[in-house]
Amino acid sequence: MFALTLTVLAAANPCVDSTDPLRSFSTCFDPWRGFEVAGAGRFSSFGVEGAVSVDLRMRRERDSWSKADSTWLSLHRVAGTQWQPRVSRVDATAWEFVFRRHAADTSLTLPTIPVTRLPFPFDVGLAGSVARFEWAMRPTESWALETARFGFLFDPIRAETNQFHLGFGPVAQHRVANLDGALQHDVTPLTAGLLFFSAETNDGHAFVRGTTLGGAVLKLDGTNVKWSSQVRSQLEAGFVLLALNDQPLVLSAKGEAWWRAGAPLEWSASATLGFRLFSDRRG
């Protein structure tokens, strides 16, 4: 009877399968949950190189404390690190996040007499990162620290789950870099825009996500102060090749382009094979 119950439950759950009545296994995976160790082949405007990376991703959902019938949906990337041995380069991010508040009723309330409510067809959110560090030994030793980046997002899709996100809005950012022994500060006082999107299949076997950040940046180099323009875009798509003991092996492709005024276009394309732990999902 117990074995029959397990078989019926497994059959009713599209994210659970079984090879026999006493052993079930997950068939769904969460692209935004788990610890991933990956290796990549990377092609860029500077040549061909390899890279090793580790990422911890999480997703959260909770009811809003300030607005009834609304939910906060969030995506997190913590302690993400990539090492490129050929150029002795390290990229590390302490925390990268996306928060979105999905409300059943979206409106703007104007303090008129009487009070006026206007339709507002967007979810609102916040996206950004804290403490993103870049360090390289070749061709010359250099480093840069993006202390913080915050973007205020508006999402017209208003999906009820974390499965889909599409947000755009203004960005504030600060970055300091060591250029030939001198420090240069880049400040973006809400003079740039951010576009973020993330989507995945119901079973988590395939995903796509990307960001575009661009606009005007205030560069402070000693006594020199000037405005400059730059755009940086990233696009990544991947799918699960197979699962080993309910832990997926993920193949993904990623492209990146970075343009700055007065400098040539920089680009890169990479293929990554990663083993993601603790991302199996049973419902």
Image: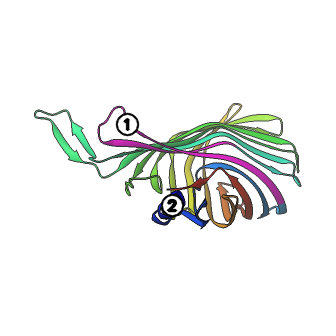
* 180, 202: nearer the viewer: 202
Does dot 2 land on a helix, a strand or a loop?
strand
Q: How is the image coloured?
A: rainbow
* 110, 93: nearer the viewer: 93
Residue 126 in the image: x percent, y percent? 47, 42
Residue 68 in the image: x percent, y percent? 29, 37
Residue 95: name its quadrant. top right
Residue type at mark 2 is: Ala
> Range of the magenta residues?
50-79
Q: Residue, x 88% and y 49% (percent of image)?
A: 138
Left or right: 125 with respect to 117? Answer: right
Residue 164 lies, with reference to residue 69, above or below; the image says: below
Can residue 69 be seen in the rendering of this structure?
Answer: yes
Residue 224: name its quadrant. top right
The rendered magenta stretch, by its main secondary structure, is classed as: strand
Dot label at residue 199: 2
Residue 225: name its quadrant. top right
Q: Residue, x 34% and y 50% (percent of image)?
A: 122
Residue 67 lies, with reference to residue 20, above or below; the image says: above
Q: How many residues crowd mark 1 within 10 Å: few (<14), some (14–19), many (20+)?
A: some
Q: Residue, x 71% and y 31% (percent of image)?
A: 222
Q: How many residues crowd mark 2 within 10 Å: few (<14), some (14–19), many (20+)?
A: some
Q: Is residue 62 magenta?
A: yes
Residue that protrudes farthest toward the front in the picture? 1
> Which residue, given by chain and number where applicable, does mark 1 sit on?
64
Using the numbered discs, state the Cα–Cα distance from disc 2 to disc 1 in whole angstroms: 23 Å
| Number of numbered tags placed on the structure image | 2
Residue 274 in the image: x percent, y percent? 73, 58
Q: Does the magenta stretch include residue 109?
A: no
Left or right: 274 with respect to 32? Answer: right
Residue type at mark 1 is: Ser
